[in-house]
Image (tube, grey):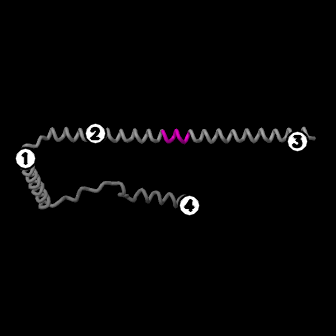
Amino acid sequence: MLIMKNFNKRKDRKLFKRDVFRRRKSSDIKPTWRILLEALLMLLSGSWLLLFLNTLPRNYDFAAIISKAAVDLLNGVIQILDALTLFGSIALIAGLVVLGLLLLIGSLWRLVRIISLLISRSKKARKLTNR
């Protein structure tokens, strides 16, 4: 009985049309007055932009401006890389300092352990000889 109910639900689901992942129909056509208004605005803004660019002085040397911008950009990249190498060298030196300190502390700790071991052995040896 339970199986039949699930089967009927599946059958009903197949009949039900889902529009979740379907594209919308292109029935939203813009009115002609809106398309005309958009075309006129685009025409006016394009012509005004070209008129403005035409009024710029003729003595601009765009090749020189572009080459200067490229040189400035490359100089900036070189400065960034130089700063990164300096930071890397500082980090390397700091790491070596920490490593040296750890080696010194570790060696001192081992020396203290060896000395304490030798002292305890000598005390045990004295106790055995005194008996």
Q: Nearer the viewer, residue 15 or 99?
A: 99
Q: Earlier in the sequence, mark 1 or mark 3?
A: 1
Q: Which residue is mark 3?
A: 127
Q: Earlier in the sequence, mark 1 or mark 2?
A: 1
In the depicted structure, whether residue 111 falls above or below residue 31: above
- Secondary structure found at label 4: helix
Horizontal and vertical percent position of residue 13: 43, 58
Q: What's the magenta region?
A: 93-99
Circle 2 SS class: helix
Does 83 lie within the magenta span?
Answer: no
First in sequence: mark 4 or mark 2? 4
Q: Position of residue 110 (x, y in %)?
A: 68, 39
Real-space Cα separation, disc 1 to disc 3, in angstroms = 105 Å
Q: Which residue is mark 2?
A: 75
- What's the mark number on residue 78? none
Q: In terms of image quadrants, where is residue 101?
A: top right
Q: Which residue is mark 4?
A: 2
Majority SS type along the magenta span: helix
Q: Image check: 61 left or right of 22?
A: left
Q: Residues within 10 Å of mark 3 (few under 14, many from 20)?
A: few
